[in-house]
Every structure is written in structure tokens, then in C-alpha cells.
Amino acid sequence: MIEYKGFIGHFKFDETKSMFYGCVANTNEVITFQGKSVKEIKQRFHDAIDEHIEWRKKYGKKPEQPSSLK
């Protein structure tokens, strides 16, 4: 589990493809990310969140607040 700007990401490793695949758990939006290393998956997670926030701003949508996982 990783966190960035309040968003929580989960990822797993697919041994057959040698890739990490992840998704954001505490949002109503579908946000996914992937990478070939732990360093890369973390960066791709950050990029996905930043792109999501920018997209919402660009289209005049209120920035989504991540929901609690409690």
C-alpha cells in the first residue's frame, strides 16, 4: 500500500509479465497505474494522481477528496 496526496494505492506483481499493476482504492474514480520496478510503480502512482487532479481542474470539476478507508 502506498499513499500520495491522501490517495491510497494498492499494487501487485504479475510474475508472468514481470510487471507491477496497481489501482487507487479510496476514490470513486477508476485510476490505475503500472511499472516494472518498485521505484517506477511509485512514480507512476504519483503521476496518475497528479494527472487525475489536473484533468478535473481542466474540465471544471471540483477536486475529488479521497475517501477514508476506515
Image (tube, rainbow, N blue to C red):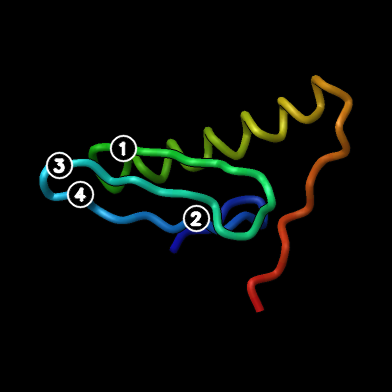
Relative to residue 35, is residue 68 depicted above or below? below
Q: Is residue 62 left or right of residue 30?
A: right
Label 4 and label 1: CA atoms lie apart by 11 Å
The numbered mark, 2 or 3, whose residue comes first in the sequence reads 2
- Badge 3, how many Cα within 10 Å: few under 14, some, many 20+? few
Q: Which residue is mark 4?
A: 14
Contact (CB < 8 A) between labels 1 and 3?
no
Callout 2, which amino acid?
Gly
Contact (CB < 8 A) between labels 3 and 4?
yes
Label 1 and label 2: CA atoms lie apart by 13 Å
The numbered mark, 1 or 3, whose residue comes first in the sequence reads 3
Contact (CB < 8 A) between labels 4 and 1?
no
- Badge 1, how many Cα within 10 Å: few under 14, some, many 20+? some
Callout 1, which amino acid?
Gly
For residue 43, the mark is none
Q: Which residue is mark 1?
A: 35
Callout 3, which amino acid?
Ser
At x 64% / y 72%, what residue is drawn?
Answer: 69
Q: Is residue 44 left or right of residue 19?
A: right
For the residues carrying marks 4 and 1, which lies nearer the camera in this image?
4
For residue 18, the mark is 3
Disc 4, SS: strand
For residue 9, the mark is 2
